[in-house]
Amino acid sequence: MEFLELLLILVALILIIKKPEKENLAFGLVMVAWLMMIIFYVGHKSTGLLTIMNL
């Protein structure tokens, strides 16, 4: 899952470089990646459900 998050950030970076007018879309992709990271971290630390899986 970390690969997917890093891929979303990479796509956002490429989008900003290639098409600066799509900055809002790139910002949305970064926010989605950050929210995924937060959800996985909280789920891993608080519930213990994700401790046996390698995300």
Image (cartoon, rainbow, N blue to C red):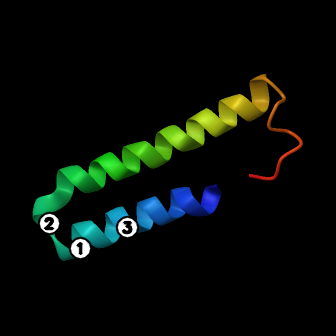
Helix, strand or loop at mark 1: helix
Please say if 35 is above or below 15. Answer: above
- How many callouts does the rendering have? 3
Q: Quadrant of the N terminus?
A: bottom right
Q: CA distance from mark 1 to mark 3?
A: 10 Å
The location of residue 3, given as percent across then percent down, is 60, 63
Q: Quadrant of residue 8?
A: bottom left
Q: Amino acid at mark 3?
A: Val
The location of residue 36, given as percent across then percent down, is 54, 42
Please say if 45 is above or below 31. Answer: above
Instruction: Give the camera-side residue of 22 and 49.
Output: 49
- Residue drawn at (49%, 65%) of the image: 7
Q: Which residue is mark 3?
A: 11
Asked whether the beta carbons under mark 1 and mark 3 sit within 8 Å of each other, the answer is: no
* Between discs 1 and 3, the one toward the N terminus: 3
Quick check: 35 left or right of 54? left
Q: Farthest residue toward the right?
A: 52
Q: In front: mark 2 or mark 3?
A: 3
Q: Amino acid at mark 1?
A: Ile
Q: CA distance from mark 1 to mark 2?
A: 6 Å
Q: Which residue is mark 1?
A: 17
Q: Farthest residue toward the top?
A: 46
- Residue drawn at (42%, 44%) of the image: 32
- Residue drawn at (29%, 50%) of the image: 27
Asked whether the beta carbons under mark 1 and mark 2 sit within 8 Å of each other, the answer is: yes
Q: Which residue is mark 2?
A: 20
Q: Amino acid at mark 2?
A: Pro
The location of residue 4, given as percent across then percent down, is 55, 60
Q: Residues within 10 Å of mark 1 (few under 14, many from 20)?
A: few
Helix, strand or loop at mark 2: helix
Q: Quadrant of residue 14?
A: bottom left
